[in-house]
């Protein structure tokens, strides 16, 4: 019996879409998904537009603040799985105000194919955004932003090992290694030397968060060069850039052979001064950029093959 031919994946670009995150607050956009119904609908729309991977946070349905409660996640995860073939990628970042156990609680219940994993501790500052708004929908929003000048997002080497053992070894999760600066690449290389994680690793190289590396093309080139030196051919990579740098950096990544991430977690806008009305709108735009550059958007099954995922049949939602 002849074996089925393998798909040619060389021209495929994985689109990840980060649906809501924990950075932006409800005042900032009426289109930010907050309730489980909104998150489910927005994620399904992004998948229909071409996102192969859906990166998911949860929010308190009453006031939109970030939550790690597995019960809230389970109000939208099964609906997304039933309606799409997309890869579900659950945050282990949550928010800087959560403990590590709160940040991984939903993934321990849901056992997704993928989880995000910040590759180090860092200042994670949101406070400059506070000056852009005069009135707030909820009392928690302004202090949440203003007090971020004292925030440290903690992921020590012990924390990283704990998350790997709980979710990688315990649930067969593949990680999206979020690297906010050059040192995070070296942290991942150190972890690989210790036997943590299984190559090929999947890097998400992040630009434009205050506390991390800035959104300069020279920085993108240097991060890619450093990844080549550290990981050789044993990695795949993607780029996200915050705010107005989102689409330009996606274009650069595509031309350099990388993958892309968009979504309302990373930018609330679709153009200069124009709020994005949905995650699907951003996915549609970046897909057009990818296709205009002569590439194709990877399907969810393409992404599973490219990243070596366990498959949707083995999740618990």
Image (cartoon, helix red, strand yellow):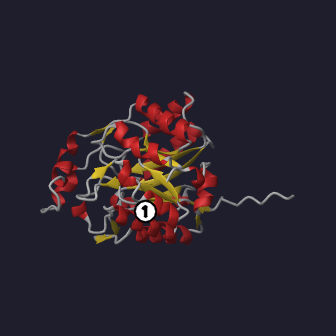
CA neighbours of label 1 inside 10 A, class few (<14), some (14 to 19), many (20+): some
How many numbered marks are there? 1
Above or below for 232 versus 220? above
Asked if residue 80 lies left or right of residue 58, the reply is right
Q: Position of residue 201 (x, y in %)?
A: 56, 43
Q: Position of residue 191 (x, y in %)?
A: 51, 31
Choose top left, top right, bottom left or bottom right for residue 155: top left
From the image, tell me which residue sits under label 1.
Answer: 248
Q: Residue at x 48, y 35 (%)?
A: 166
Helix, strand or loop at disc 1? helix
* Residue appearing at x 45%, y 45% in the figure: 109
* Quarter of the image that includes the N terminus: bottom right
Q: Nearer the viewer, residue 244 or 69?
A: 69
In the depicted view, which residue is nearer to us: 63 or 215? 63
Residue placed furthest toward the right: 1
For the view shown, which residue lies furthest in the left direction?
Answer: 134
Q: Position of residue 15 (x, y in %)?
A: 51, 61
* 303 with respect to 64 (left or right): right
Q: Is 195 placed above or below 304 here?
A: above
For the question of whether residue 180 can be seen, the reply is no
Q: Is residue 167 visible?
A: yes
- The residue at 16%/49% (across/down) is 143
Q: Residue at x 43, y 30 (%)?
A: 157
Q: Nearer the viewer, residue 117 or 252?
A: 117
Where residue 102 sits: x, y (%)? 34, 41
In the displayed structure, would residue 64 be above or below residue 310?
A: below
């Amino acid at each position: 019996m002849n074996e089925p031919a393998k798909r040619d994946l060389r021209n495929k670009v994985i689109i990840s879409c980060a649906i809501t995150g924990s950075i932006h607050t409800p005042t900032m956009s009426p289109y930010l998904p907050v309730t489980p119904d909104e998150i489910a609908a927005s994620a399904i729309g992004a998948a229909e537009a071409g996102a192969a991977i859906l990166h998911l946070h949860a929010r308190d349905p009453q006031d939109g603040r970030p939550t790690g409660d597995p019960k809230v996640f389970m109000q939208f995860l099964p609906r997304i799985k039933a309606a799409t073939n997309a890869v579900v990628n659950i945050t282990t970042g949550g928010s800087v105000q959560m403990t590590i156990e709160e940040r991984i609680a939903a993934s321990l219940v849901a056992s997704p194919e993928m989880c995000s994993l910040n590759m180090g501790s860092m200042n994670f500052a949101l406070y400059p955004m506070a000056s852009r708004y005069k009135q707030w929908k909820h009392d928690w929003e302004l202090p949440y932003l203003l007090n971020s000048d004292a925030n440290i997002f903690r992921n020590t080497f012990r924390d990283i090992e704990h998350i790997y053992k709980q979710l990688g070894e315990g649930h067969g999760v593949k990680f999206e290694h979020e690297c906010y600066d050059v040192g995070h690449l070296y942290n991942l290389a150190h972890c690989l030397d210790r036997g943590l994680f299984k190559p090929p690793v999947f890097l998400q190289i992040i630009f434009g968060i205050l506390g991390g590396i800035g959104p300069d093309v020279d920085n993108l080139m240097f991060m890619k060069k450093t990844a080549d030196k550290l990981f050789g051919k044993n990695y795949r990579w993607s780029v996200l850039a915050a705010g107005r740098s989102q689409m330009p950096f996606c274009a650069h990544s595509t031309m350099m052979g990388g993958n892309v991430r968009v979504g309302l977690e990373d930018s609330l806008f679709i153009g200069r001064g124009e709020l994005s009305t949905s995650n699907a709108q951003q996915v549609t735009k970046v897909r057009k950029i990818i296709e205009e550059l002569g590439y194709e958007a990877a399907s969810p099954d393409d992404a599973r093959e490219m990243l070596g995922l366990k498959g949707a049949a083995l999740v618990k939602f």
